[in-house]
Amino acid sequence: MFSALRQVFSNARYLVIASTIALVVYTLALWLPNVRLILDILFSGTVSFSEKLSFLWSLYGSIATNFTLVSATYTILISILFGMSTALITYYIKKRRTLGGSGATLSIGGLISGVFGIGCAACGTFLLTSFLTLFGAANALAFLPFGGEEFGFIGVVLLLYSVYAITNKISKGVVCSV
Amino acid sequence: MKNNLNSLGVPIAIVIAGGLVALAIIFSGGGSKAAINKGGAQPPTGQQEAGAIENYRKISDKDHIAGNPNASVKIIEYSDFECPFCKRFHETMNTVIENEDVAWVYRHFPLDSLHPRNARRAAVASECANELGGNDAFWKFTNGWFKVSPANDRTDFEVVVSDLVQEIGLNETAFNECLESGKYDEHVQADVDDAVATGGRGTPWSIIVGPNGKTYPLNGAQPLSAVGQLIELAKSEK
């Protein structure tokens, strides 16, 4: 596994892909609760460009104020693992031009699960809460032992397995199967 | 054929994931009424369309206001006494109102499905403190509660409230009568309905109102720097 990781990430291109995707996922996690406000400010004609940038930057501080230690940890882990997973898939596809379903599916599954876990379990701002409401099941969150943070944990596990599965494929070599 | 399907797997999975994430974002913007209902039985019956921030109930002398009531920028915060992030944001707001041109308007938004034991009762208790000791007593109760509460419905309600009532110097008998009377149930529910009508779907939910009436929605316990910048942006829109 580690030799495959070294093999892929010794190439700067894949390091850039992983970092960029990780940053995008992390940014989405922090900005998602305030999409409406962000759009208002971005499209405001009276707010200068530097003020827009400065405001967006200030929202990164919410990792310390709007997340618990646990949710902040899995949000960061999901971002990093999704970035890694995407870079590994890209590498593998580029070499072999195809990818057996499991790696990609797990990555995507991990991200979706993680996304549902984003938010504040104690304050009802989970994306999951909104989703469950559609089925009239928002109160179900109260019965989950971690109030919905489970989805963040599942996201991390799926992504870890995804990285493991793809690195295994890469380690086995880029050969045609008989 | 199998190889073709495999090679299509990644783009299809990405499209499905994108769709699901987009759906999640859209739904999350639609308001989560069930999460904030008392007992989850019926959605609040506000006349206004959910999510329209301009529908906020106009600020009046019936509101609980800290800071300068005549400030050019007003921040209406909808808060839950048992939400740990409201506890954090309460500290932030206490720092924010050191700015003399900001008024902090406190409204109730107890999330009964998440904090069924204490959140609504504490909201009613704060109203009783207000009735017996005025605006000053309301803020002493609120600040005192957030200072000692461990949040997430773990507060020992009777002990904390009794301590606060004595500390503030309220008549304990009158306070308990008020608490049991149910006279502020409607008031608290009106705040909840107002939060929902403006698009609140969790706490803390805040609306920043600029000098020209322009509104900015702020979700969650955002850092002091973000709140400070929003205040400056609101002020600059004259």
Image: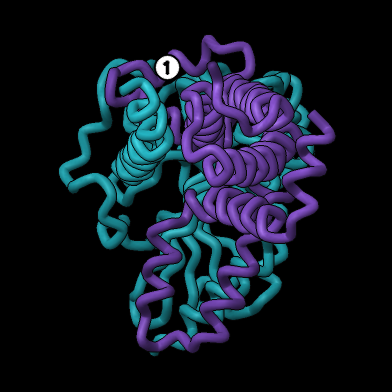
Disc 1, SS: helix
Residue A54 x %, y %: 61, 77
Q: Is residue B5 left or right of residue A75?
A: left
The N terminus of chain B, quarter of image: top left
How many residues crowd around disc 1 within 10 Å: few (fewer than 14), some, or many (20 or more)? many
The C terminus of chain B, quarter of image: bottom left
Q: Is residue B113 above or below residue B77?
A: above
Colour theme: by chain
Residue placed most toward the observer, A88 or A178: A178
Residue at image coords 28%, 19%: A135
Residue at image coords 39%, 21%: A138
The answer for which chain carries disc 1 is: A
Whether residue A102 appears in this view of the structure is yes
Residue at image coords 70%, 25%: A172
Residue placed most toward the observer, B23 or A178: A178
Residue at image coords 54%, 38%: A96
The colour with which the image depicts chain A is purple
What amino acid is at disc 1? Asn
Residue B34 x %, y %: 34, 25
Where does label 1 land, which residue? A139
Q: Is residue B202 above or below residue A160?
A: below
The colour with which the image depicts chain B is cyan
Q: Is residue B162 left or right of residue B238?
A: right
Whether residue B28 appears in this view of the structure is no
Q: Is residue A133 left or right of residue A139?
A: left
Q: Quadrant of residue A1?
A: top right
Q: Is residue B115 above or below residue B196?
A: above
Residue A163 x %, y %: 67, 30
Q: Quadrant of residue A47?
A: bottom left
Residue placed most toward the observer, B132 or B85: B85
